[in-house]
Image (cartoon, rainbow, N blue to C red):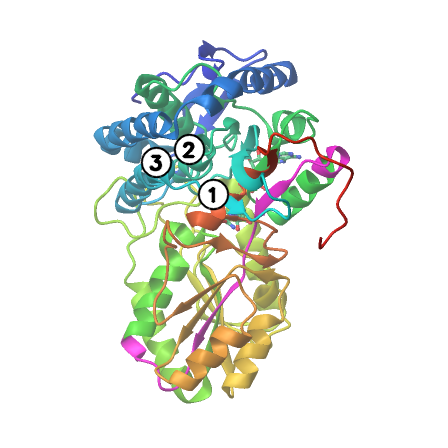
């Protein structure tokens, strides 16, 4: 393993944890690949204090100077792309080609947000009184806490850190306890790029301990979290006690609608990638496929055939399409959901499971399963699976597709494959999701706005709207008339 993972980065110093280190498991082998510090609550609080102390100077730097450091971080990530990609594979299990894409994204977040150095603007407003000027300027929120999941352990570091930095904030970031290695590796690159002490702090440790301490801290100004709905709920409750704003990117149950006029090959290829990339562990993955009855049989035939062609194996191999699940716990969760779906009447159109011969001994392997759903109300059609298992439901018409798509606690991503302009425009108006993909799949773009409705979480990342969360507004009322102000003017005068 390339790198030293025995220390975390707090206030510019490399520190061991206060208790026994936590082992990191390689999901391909089930073996321990590193041990990382387990921060104490006290160390988490130290990190917040360091971020608080460092913020004023960082916020006062010219944005261009902050941007220069960010460009250096991007360059270093690109320089270290291959070892970083391999690290992501080893801690998380996605195929190396996908990991390279993730690292490309991790660098791009810094480049993209560095470009805002000259673009964070305010507004000048007409005053009601001669000799006075009003303006609104955007200022840093202050100290940000970032909490991220395990499915994109490198890209999500950048997704939180880059907008925080260009806005003039400091940040304490906690990676997922199962996948902290790329965050620690990137911390060394950030230090090398010249990030001042305390501006970025990477604290490793448990969610219920370190995560809870950070998110219930009264002295932070923004919590940005990507993860599951239950954790999002807990964080929102903790933050409510201190009235700290939260931005939550939570789970999804993306409907993938294929109408009878769709290009079948295009829709099948898109569905395969969208469901099985990263072993199905992507928040925008196709989680329920709705196919028009006239195309259903042909779609199922081709989808099953294409899925069977996917090569499951060592994710470090260039020819692997599907790596292991991230952990045994996640694998067992997906198995339970699948068994319950079959017990409640879902028809196995392709029955996967743990392979008889493991591609690599000890890994958390699960081959794809495709289920014929009997109703939109089945749990497998409603609950997030986050694995290589997908239900397909036959639909009669477009109205039914839209109604089923919208009848969900989730509202992150939705897909529609059709060449009918009227349906496309209706979908844009009527599908109540934060992100709609028409005749294409993700990933989402840096300049977009990744946002979910309902339980997919209040908040959003990326683009100008994502950056907005990291800034607050300050209104300035200035009197340059040389006269003193006489009394209060009523509104409208
Ligand atoms: P998770 O909620 O279990 O963990 C996410 C993070 O929260 C981890 O760092 C964890 O340590 C931390 N945490 C746990 N308990 C905490 C607490 N009490 N206080 C503070 N922090 C705590 O999620 P996961 O299993 O890592 O990720 C999978 C989920 O993430 C899926 O539901 C997926 O859809 C979602 N996800 C969403 C997006 C998105 O952009 N919307 C992207 C990726 C993943």
Viewer-side residue, 180 vs 306:
180
Q: Quadrant of the image for the N terminus?
A: top left
Q: Earlier in the sequence, mark 1 or mark 3?
A: 3
Q: Earlier in the sequence, mark 3 or mark 2?
A: 3
Q: Is residue 195 visible?
A: yes
Q: Is residue 270 above or below residue 208?
A: below
Q: At x 48% / y 40%, what residue is drawn?
A: 327
Distance (Cα) linking label 1 and label 2: 9 Å
Neighbours of disc 1 within 10 Å: few (<14), some (14-19), many (20+): many
Residue 423 is situated, as x and y percent measured from the top left of the image, at 44, 83
Residue 182 is situated, as x and y percent measured from the top left of the image, at 38, 29
Neighbours of disc 3 within 10 Å: few (<14), some (14-19), many (20+): many
- Whether the residue carrying mark 1 lies under 8 Å from ligand 1 is answered with no
Distance (Cα) linking label 1 and label 3: 11 Å
Residue 71 is situated, as x and y percent measured from the top left of the image, at 29, 31
Viewer-side residue, 12 vs 338:
12
Q: Which residue is mark 3?
A: 114
Task: Give the extent of the magenta segment.
Answer: 239-265
**Disc 3 + disc 2, Cβ < 8 Å:** yes
- Whether the residue carrying mark 2 lies under 8 Å from ligand 1 is answered with no
Q: Earlier in the sequence, mark 1 or mark 2?
A: 2
Q: How many marks?
A: 3
Q: Which residue is mark 2?
A: 166
53 displayed left or right of 279: right
Does the magenta portion include 253?
A: yes
| Quadrant in which residue 184 is drawn | top left
Q: At x 47% / y 60%, what residue is drawn?
A: 389
**Disc 1 + disc 2, Cβ < 8 Å:** yes
Q: At x 30% / y 80%, what residue is drawn?
A: 263
Q: Which residue is mark 1?
A: 467
Does the magenta portion include 244?
A: yes
Distance (Cα) linking label 3 and label 2: 6 Å
């Amino acid at each position: 393993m390339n790198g030293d993972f025995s220390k975390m980065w707090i206030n510019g110093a490399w520190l061991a944890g206060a208790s026994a280190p936590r082992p990191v498991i390689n999901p391909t082998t089930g073996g321990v690949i590193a041990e990382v510090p387990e921060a104490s609550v006290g160390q988490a609080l130290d990190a917040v204090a360091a971020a608080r102390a460092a913020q004023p100077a960082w916020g006062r730097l010219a944005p261009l100077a902050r941007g220069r450091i960010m460009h250096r971080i991007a360059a270093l990530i690109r320089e270290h792309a291959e070892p970083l990609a391999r690290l992501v594979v080893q801690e998380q299990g996605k195929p190396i080609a996908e990991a390279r894409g993730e690292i490309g994204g991790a660098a791009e977040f810094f480049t993209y947000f560095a470009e805002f150095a000259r673009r964070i603007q305010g507004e000048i407003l007409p005053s009601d009184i001669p000799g006075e000027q009003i303006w609104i300027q955007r200022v840093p929120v202050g100290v940000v806490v970032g909490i991220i999941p395990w499915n994109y352990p490198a890209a999500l570091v950048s997704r939180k850190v880059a907008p925080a930095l260009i806005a003039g904030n400091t940040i304490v970031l906690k990676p997922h306890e199962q996948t902290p290695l790329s965050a620690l590796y990137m911390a060394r690159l950030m230090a090398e790029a010249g990030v001042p002490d305390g501006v970025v702090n990477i604290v490793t440790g448990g969610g219920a301990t370190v995560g809870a301490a950070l998110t219930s801290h009264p002295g932070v100004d923004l919590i940005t979290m990507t993860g599951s709905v239950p954790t999002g709920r807990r964080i929102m409750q903790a933050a409510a006690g201190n009235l700290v704003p939260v931005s939550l990117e939570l789970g999804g149950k993306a409907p993938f609608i294929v109408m009878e006029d769709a290009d079948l090959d295009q829709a099948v290829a898109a569905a395969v990638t969208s469901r099985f990339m990263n072993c199905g562990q992507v928040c925008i993955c196709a989680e329920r496929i709705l196919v028009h009855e006239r195309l259903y049989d042909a779609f199922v035939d081709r989808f099953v055939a294409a899925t069977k062609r996917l090569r499951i194996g060592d994710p470090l191999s260039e020819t692997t399409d599907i790596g292991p699940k991230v952990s045994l716990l996640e694998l067992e969760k997906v198995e339970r959901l699948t068994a319950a779906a079959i017990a409640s009447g879902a028809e196995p159109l392709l029955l996967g499971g743990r392979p008889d011969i493991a591609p690599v001994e000890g890994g958390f392997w699960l081959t794809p399963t495709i289920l014929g759903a009997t109703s939109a109300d089945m749990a497998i059609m409603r609950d997030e699976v986050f694995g290589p298992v997908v239900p397909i439901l036959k639909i009669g018409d477009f109205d039914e597709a839209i109604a089923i798509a919208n009848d969900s606690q989730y509202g992150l991503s939705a897909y529609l494959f059709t060449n009918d302009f009227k349906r496309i425009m209706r979908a844009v108006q009527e599908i109540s999701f934060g992100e709609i993909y028409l005749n294409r799949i993700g990933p989402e773009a840096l300049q977009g706005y990744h946002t979910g409705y309902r339980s997919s979480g209040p908040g959003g990342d990326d683009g100008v709207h994502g950056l907005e969360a990291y800034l607050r507004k300050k209104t300035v009322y200035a009197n340059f008339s040389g006269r003193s102000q006489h009394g209060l003017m009523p509104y409208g005068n």
